[in-house]
Image (tube, rainbow, N blue to C red):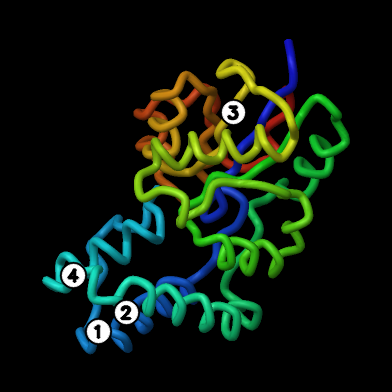
Amino acid sequence: MGPKLYLFDIDGTLIHAGKTPSRVFAESIEMVTGIPVVFPKGIFLGRTDTFIIREMLRLSDLPPADGYYERIRELFIQRMKDEFPRSTDGFIIPGVLDYLENISRNPQIKIGLVTGNFHTTAYIKLDRYGLASYFPTGGFGEDAEERNELVIQAVKKASSHFQTNFTPENITVFGDTRRDIESARYHGFNSVAISRVRDKHELAAAQPDILIDNFFELKDL
């Protein structure tokens, strides 16, 4: 069989982060650009933070080359450090802690992240819910703008970290959006879709290998 690699998205998959990240993101963009922000519907679903900043700059006719991207990114990260640990409207997806604890004891399973969050904000979120220690490596929002490339970066970094080559049939992507599922399929990886905070029928239409509401339902993987 060979070693397995399980790659987890964060938002909607491991946790529901509440309203703080999107509010801080919007305020950071507005503070840097001076332009009020209204995010298009669905812009966060399966997207990277790099894509979101660049798309909002594009919609505002502001070129990333003018330094807006880096300034927004730095302000967003700093404000997340200050504000997210005090947020109270998020929660862990049920069963996550038990599941991560169980698979972390299996020497044949290696665990990593594949998330659109920037590296720093990813661990700010995970730290808030006591999950950071399970994830020594991952692909992050700085590593790629699009999800298909992000997954490959996550696999490359995990292979380097664990000094292991993972074959496609032994790689599983855990996510909560169509883009998560489609990126896994694109590369021949397995997919597990979590519908706790999403539309179950929409996720089913994307044809994941496994569809669950929460991690208590995941018995045999």
Query: Of tags 4 and 1, which is closer to the observer?
Result: 4
Counting from the top left corner in percent of width and height, residue 76 is at: 45, 77
Question: Considering only vertical position in the picture, is 64 above or below 108?
Answer: below
Residue under label 3: 172
Residue under label 2: 29
Rendered residue at 35%/28% (across/down): 205
Residue under label 1: 33
| Residue type at the position of mark 3 | Thr
Question: Considering only vertical position in the picture, is 43 above or below 107?
Answer: below
Question: How many C-alpha atoms fall within 10 Å of the one at disc 4: few (<14), some, or many (≥20)?
Answer: few
Query: Of tags 3 and 1, which is closer to the observer?
Result: 1
Q: Is residue 57 left or right of residue 220?
A: left
Rendered residue at 78%/55% (across/down): 133
Counting from the top left corner in percent of width and height, residue 150 is at: 45, 42
Q: Are marks 1 and 2 in contact (CB under 8 Å)?
A: yes
Residue under label 4: 63
The CA distance from mark 3 to mark 1 is 39 Å
What number is the disc on residue 48? none
Q: Secondary structure at mark 4?
A: loop
First along the sequence among labels 4 and 1: 1
Quadrant for the C terminus in the image: top right
Query: Of tags 3 and 4, which is closer to the observer?
Result: 4
| Residue type at the position of mark 4 | Pro
| Residue type at the position of mark 2 | Ile
First along the sequence among labels 3 and 1: 1
Q: Secondary structure at mark 2?
A: helix
Counting from the top left corner in percent of width and height, residue 88 is at: 61, 78
